[in-house]
Image: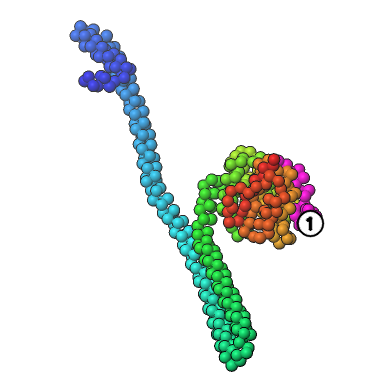
Amino acid sequence: MDEVVLGMTARQLAVGLAAAALGLATAVLGVAGQTDLAIAALGLLLAVLVVAVLDIRRRQGEMAKRLKQMAERDLRLARNVDRLRSLPANVESSGRRTLDAITGEVQSTVGRLETAGDRVLTGIAQERLAAAERHVELVSHVTGIGTAVTSVADDLTGLKKDLAGTAKLVDNARRGVLAGLEELSQGEKRRLISLREHVDKLGYEPVRQVQALMQLNKRIEARAPLPPTGGWAMEPTTLLRLVQLVDQIRPSVVVECGSGASTVWLAYALESLGSGRLVALEHDERYAEQTRRTLSEHGLSAVVEVRHAPLSDVEVNGETFTWYDPSAVQDLKDIELLLVDGPPRASGPRARYPALPLLGTRLAPGARIVLDDVDRTEEQEAADAWLAETPGLVREGSETDRSALLSYRPG
């Protein structure tokens, strides 16, 4: 009984007390013979009881509604828990499929490279065998000449001194031939070692590029399919260096000679900073329009300006080169990051050399210059010429396989 009273609300307790009082009054009035008053008290008692019952029913309805809501919420939580329990298995399965696909591709590439390397090594071995046969033939000829000279010396004593000199000359010639053959063998060994190093590098290079691309995808959330990398486009390792440079120096003005996949990645990097703009020079109007469409699909048009700059003849240090129309860069200044990835080599000899002579006065102190494709002779010569001709220009850090990083630090 105490638990029931303690579990009642104040309203229910008041109604109960009122009902008890009315019941008591009804009983007293009935005993006293006050029938009318007893009936009136009984009517009030019934009214109070009806109110109490209605209140209890209302509260039971509210309680039932709350219990139903709690049951629905528990059901939703149970479903979410089931989904969360199955999520690690789904993620593991997806990751395993991706890893198997990458591993299969890498193994296939390594297999093809090993086959090509075996063919090259077989060719070199055959060439060395032919050289050894020529060596044996020459030694045989020299030995025959020595024997003939000795025979003549025995028969002609008076000419012994001359024959001895002749023998010495022949011996020197033989030594020279042997030394030449040995030098040729050493050269073949060096070429073989270089070829093996190149084949070994090709074995792990796809993995290195995949790792760089995975790091890029973690840094940037693309809003549309990204352009392909590698081949004619910039490699993932160089793209990763560019994105890291943007994060490091936070440039206000970035200029790119050429446009394509690198333009999209640079635009995403600048957008993540919340400041800075990119100006990309493109000599082909159709390709410039294609880059603009790609940027629009990614929602990056506000960050990048793709300028059509047709190729024209420019004069640098008394020489004529084919480069972008200089009028396309007249308004540029305080460039903090310059990416030189154009014009294409087919446009003319040393096509990328004019970039620094024509844009050097527009660089900000401390600017960084990235030159792509330095695995090619012309780009290496361009970088060396820039370093020799530009005061305050220094090479910074180590080179990746296809790009060089330079820093402009004027006195």
Left or right: residue 285 compared with residue 266: right
The residue shown at (23%, 8%) is 29
Q: Quadrant of residue 75?
A: top left
Q: Which color scheme is applied? A: rainbow
- Residue 315 counted in the magenta span: yes
Indicate yes or no whether the magenta region holds residue 35: no
Q: Position of residue 45 (x, y in %)?
A: 28, 15
Image coords of residue 74 (percent x, y): 36, 38
* Residue 328 located left or right of residue 276: right
Q: 139 or 19: nearer the eye?
A: 139
Query: Magenta span covers which residues?
Result: 312-335
Identified at 34% across, 22% down, the residue is 55
Q: Is residue 161 left or right of residue 313?
A: left
Tag 1: amino acid: Glu
**Observer-nearest of 71 and 362:** 362
Residue holding disc 1: 319
Looking at the image, which residue is at 39% across and 46% down?
83
Identify the element where label 1 is drawn.
Answer: strand
Q: Let me know if residue 264 appears in the view.
A: no
Q: Position of residue 43 (x, y in %)?
A: 29, 15
